[in-house]
Structure formats: C-alpha cells, structure tokens
Image (cartoon, helix red, strand yellow):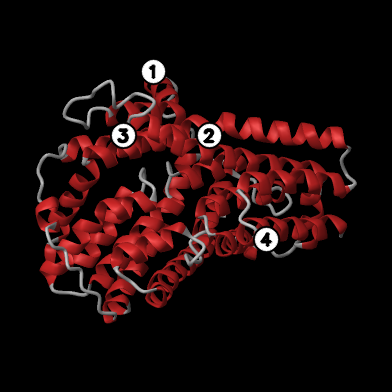
Amino acid sequence: MWLIALLVISIAFILLTTSKLKWHPVLALLVAAFGYGGFSGALSMEEVVKSVNSGFGNTIGLIGIVILAGSIIGKFLEKSGGAMTLAGGTLKLVGKKNVPLALNIIGAIVSIPVFCDSGFIILAPLAKALTKQAKISFAAGAMALSLGLILTHSIIPPTPGPVGAAGILDADLGLVFLLGLPVGITGLLAGWIFSVKIASKTRIDPSPGSVTEEVKSNGNPSAVKSVLPIFAPILLILLRSVSGLPQAPFGTGNFSTFINFFGQPVVALLIGVFLSMLLPKKLTREMISTGGWLGEAVVAAATIIIITGCGGAFGQVLQNSGIGNVIGQNLSGAESLSILLPVIIAASLKTAQGSGTVAIVAGAGIMAPLLAPLGMDAPLAKALVVVALGAGSMIASHANDSYFWVVTQMSGMSVKQGYKLQTLGTMTVGIICSLAVWLLSLAVL
C-alpha cells in the first residue's frame, strides 16, 4: 500500500506546489517524478534517472512536432483573420436569431487549433456586436462563446492537451477525435442551454462602440482557405485510423499506403501548417521569422511541449515502479467505473492549479501505468481515457485559471458574476461531458 500512499502524496505535492506556491508545472512534475521514484523503494536511483529520461524523450518524440504544428496553424488563423472568417460563415449558417448557438459553435470550431484565451480575445468583438444587435444580455453571448472554446480545446485534437495525453498513453489520435465528437456535441448542447437558460438572466451591456465596423471588415481570407488548415489534417488522420481497422476498408494497395503516410499526425499537421501559410494576402519573410507569427507560435508551443514531456517522465517512473499492478488488484471488479478515474484526477488537478492542459497531461502521466491493470489498454479504451481526461479538465475554471480572467475582464463581469457564470458553466459542461464519456464507455468498451 506504500506505493498507493506515495502516489496520493505525489499528486497532493503537484497540487500544492502549482496552486499555492505558484511553482511552474515543469518543476513540480520533475520533483514529483524523482521524489516518487526515490521513495518508492521499487527502483534504484539509476533506474529513476533512466525512467525520467526515457519518459521525457519518448513523449516529446511522439507529439512534439504535432503540438508545434498545431500552434503554428492557430497563430496564422488568429493573425490573418481566418478565425473571424470562420465565425462569419458559422453565423450565416445558424442565423442571427440564434446568436448564443452561433457563438457556441463558432467557439467550438475556432478552438480546435487556437488557444481558448486567444480565441476569446479574437472573437469577443464579434460576440459584443451580435448580442447588441439581438438585444440580449452579453452574458449569454460571452458564456456561449467561452464554453464552446473550452470544450473543443479540452477534448478534440490537435489541441495540445489531448495530443499530449494521446502521446503519453499511446492512443490513436483519430480514435480520440471520433470518440470525442459525440462527447463534444453533448457538451456543446449543455453549454448552449446553460447560456440561454442561466447566463441570459444576468444582465451585462456589451457596449460595443465601434466594434460593429471591426466585425464587418472584409479583408480576411476566404472561408475555404480558413477551413482547410483545420479540417484537412483531421480528415487525413481519420482516414488513417479507418485504414488501420482489421477489415482493411482501403485494401493494401497504393491508396492505403498513401493514407497511412499522409495520415500520420506529424505529416498531416505539417500539411496543415503549409495550408495555413496561404491565409495571409501575402506571405512575407517577417511572418516566418523568429520575431514574426511563426516565432510567436514556436514560443507558445515550447512550454506545452516541455510540460508534456515532464508529464511523460512522471508517468514512466510510476509505470516502472509497478504501481499499476497494485492499483489493478485493489480495483478489480470495478471496471465499469474505471473510466471515471481519469475524470476525477483531471478535475482535481484543474481545480487546484488552473491549467486545463497541465491537468490533462499530468493526469495522463498518472493514468499511463494503470491502463493495463484496469483492462483499459485496448486502442478504443486508451482513446476514451484521453477524452475522459479532457472532460475532467473543464471542472472548473475559477480565479487560478488565466482563462477565467480573460473571460470576465473582456466581458465586463464582476468576480462574483464570473463564479456564477464561468465557473458554474465550465463545471456544468465538464460534468455533462464526463457522464457522456461514462455512457459511451458502456457502449464501446
């Protein structure tokens, strides 16, 4: 039982140091990895070092370029105005009468490659103008946008959290997308209902000023150009997952070989990077310089990649200590509830330290050695664990989360209103998505 007690102490250490002492997650994860390995008694110090090195290197080797490519695509969409084009196209499909639904869907689409914080900052002027025109409280529009953004950012690849977790757990990204889709749609409906039924009762004046003119700017790239960098890689990754099924639906010829190469996440996302470079009216040397759009994307991705690598290091130490067998023996017979374990872990990490990405990645490191003992090491199960971590990581955004402050400050909410809307909203969507994951597990596992 010492290994289980030490795991609890390690998780508590990560929570305390990142939330209360404000340590960087990289330091907290590395200290936890060495501390757990050293005190476990199951590994020599030399084996601990080897575990940390191999866990860090293997994880980054699997997903480093994927995260980097996703960051570049998001930055080019943000800077070129492609995100606003996607927003305008979605609005036309849904209609101005359904402003909260439109903003919910817009947020969900834009946040696949763009970080929540950036997405809200980009789209807040649009949300203000639309809610003003629809004569509804900006609270409804702001929450619809916020919940749509955090939903796909937490569940759907190629956002960093799901990609990092998939790398640590060796899960198929195509399966993560396929399983995340019904969970995401469920969460989308929950976010829309919350915005219309609960958030709309809080009166906030958007006061857009000159925002309408900014929204109507037509210097942005076309809808086709804006969609391609996001959905072309996703399509290729999905086709590769389908190609790998036992039935071999694409056969074993040239087309299958083509899909298996170009559908690899690294290759697919790099294709997305080149497609994103078609978004500006004119691609300049400045944009792809170290100080330009590309340079900004590299800097943004670096932190996520390193945190993910440290999560992998912690997970490798746990795995090599043999804790998986210990926990598996104690949880035997509880397989139907085991999918809720990653939800609880991610929710605890998120609530304590604020970052959803850190919660997903650190949670994946904790779950990695437990998959086999819990009978969740099949491809579908691994992918569903990634989705479960994403669902848990939404519970709940509050004062220690930078996204909480972006939403409240840009929406004109007081802190009290922020807890009533942003915190309660993310908790609601996270819980609904977690229940959807559990129901899905009963059907597919």
Q: Marks 2 and 4, Cα distance to the nearest angstrom?
A: 28 Å
Q: Marks 2 and 1, Cα distance to the nearest angstrom?
A: 27 Å
**Looking at the image, which residue is at 26% across and 39% down?**
79
Question: From the viewer's perspective, is the residue at label 1 or at label 3 nearer?
Answer: 3
Residue to which mark 1 is pinned: 254
- Height in image: 411 above or below 58? below
Residue 276 in picture, x, y percent from top left: 28, 31
Question: From the viewer's perspective, is the residue at label 2 or at label 1 nearer?
Answer: 2
Which corner quadrant holds the C terminus? bottom right
Residue to which mark 3 is pinned: 232
Q: Marks 4 and 1, Cα distance to the nearest angstrom?
A: 54 Å
**Looking at the image, which residue is at 74% across and 55% down?**
10
Q: Quadrant of residue 94?
A: bottom left
Under mark 4, the amino acid is: Leu
Under mark 2, the amino acid is: Ile
For residue 63, which numbered disc appears in the image? 2
Under mark 3, the amino acid is: Ala
For residue 38, which numbered disc appears in the image? none
* Of residues 162 and 53, the one drawn nearer to the viewer in this rendering: 53
**Looking at the image, which residue is at 10% across and 51% down?**
216
Q: Residues within 10 Å of mark 2 (few under 14, many from 20)?
A: many
- Looking at the image, can residue 54 be seen? yes
Disc 4 or 1, which lies upstream in sequence? 4
Disc 2 or 4, which lies upstream in sequence? 4
Residue 328 in picture, x, y percent from top left: 76, 56
Q: Residues within 10 Å of mark 1 (few under 14, many from 20)?
A: few
Q: Marks 3 and 4, Cα distance to the nearest angstrom?
A: 41 Å
Disc 3 or 2, which lies upstream in sequence? 2
Residue to which mark 4 is pinned: 16
